[in-house]
Image (cartoon, rainbow, N blue to C red):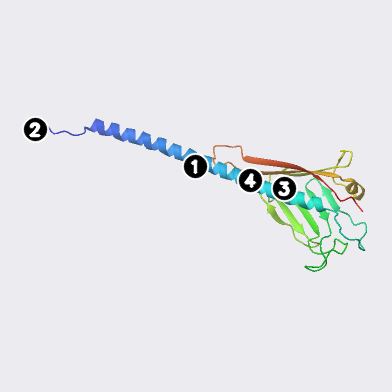
């Protein structure tokens, strides 16, 4: 009699179990790898947002009070508001129309710039001009993620909100921007956060 070869039921169950274990291990590896990649992409995005905000605010704060020509608006304030999470700056860089040269007054479009924190939207808002509505500049900014600190020439901190006399004394502004987002892995309760800081020297003395 010829003996027929084949897998027994026990061998089949063992093979299926081994395949299942391998599949679960592969799935777990892929899930961890995908989560790791998502976390890395999120960190890069948060860094880019924070860097963008920092660069913009630093550049515009350095222009606060700039006036390339003398004009009728002598003595205009470079900072019209200096608070812990809000700053309003002015500078003259254009005339009343596009292409017009500076006229000595910060009363033309975009010569007044506002940065402020909106806790409801967890965003830094930016507005320009006298009537410009604040618009989201960057989001994913937690409470305390946008902080402005002000110092005079002796490095003495000036505590907000500053009145006109104290605003004229501001020589340095320390800016902190933090971005944060929940971790892609829901089992990780700590969010991914990134914080950047810069110290801005105001080169334009109050006039």
| CA–CA distance in space, label 3 to label 4 | 12 Å
Q: Is residue 124 visible?
A: yes
Residue with the mark numbered 3: 54
Residue with the mark numbered 4: 46
- Which callout, 4 or 2, points at the residue further toward the start of the chain? 2
| CA–CA distance in space, label 1 to label 3 | 30 Å
Residue with the mark numbered 1: 34
* Horizontal relation, residue 2 to residue 78: left or right: left
- Which callout, 1 or 3, points at the residue further toward the start of the chain? 1
Rendering coords of residue 16 (x, y %): 30, 35
* Horizontal relation, residue 104 to residue 55: left or right: right
Of the 4 image quadrants, the one containing the N terminus is: top left
Question: Which callout, 1 or 3, points to the residue nearer the camera?
Answer: 3
- Which callout, 3 or 4, points at the residue further toward the start of the chain? 4
Task: Write the residue at 90% across / 46% down.
Answer: 169
| CA–CA distance in space, label 3 to label 2 | 83 Å
Q: Is residue 76 above or below residue 16?
A: below
| CA–CA distance in space, label 2 to label 1 | 53 Å
Q: Are marks 4 and 2 in contact (CB under 8 Å)?
A: no
Q: Are marks 3 and 4 in contact (CB under 8 Å)?
A: no
Task: Write the residue at 74% across / 55% down.
Answer: 126
Residue with the mark numbered 2: 2
Task: Mark 3: give few (<14), some (14-19) or many (20+) Cα within 10 Å.
Answer: some
């Amino acid at each position: 009699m010829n003996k027929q070869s084949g897998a027994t039921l026990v061998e089949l169950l063992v093979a299926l179990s081994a395949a299942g274990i391998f599949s679960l291990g592969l799935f777990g590896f892929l899930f961890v790898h995908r989560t790791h990649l998502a976390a890395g992409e999120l960190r890069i995005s948060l860094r880019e947002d924070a860097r963008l905000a920092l660069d913009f605010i630093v550049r515009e704060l350095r222009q606060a009070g700039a006036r390339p020509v003398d004009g009728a608006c002598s003595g205009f304030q470079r900072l019209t508001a200096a608070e812990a999470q809000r700053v309003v700056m002015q500078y003259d860089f254009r005339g009343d129309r596009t292409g017009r040269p500076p006229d000595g007054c910060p009363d033309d479009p975009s010569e007044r710039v506002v940065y402020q924190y909106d806790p409801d939207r967890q965003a830094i808002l930016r507005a320009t001009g006298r009537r410009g509505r604040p618009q989201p500049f960057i989001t994913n900014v937690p409470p305390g993620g946008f902080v402005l600190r002000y110092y005079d020439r002796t490095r003495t901190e000036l505590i907000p909100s500053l009145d006109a006399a104290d605003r004229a004394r501001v020589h340095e502004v320390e800016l902190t921007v933090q971005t944060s987002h929940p971790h892609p892995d829901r089992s990780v309760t700590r969010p991914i956060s990134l914080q950047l800081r810069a110290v801005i020297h105001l080169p334009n003395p109050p006039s």
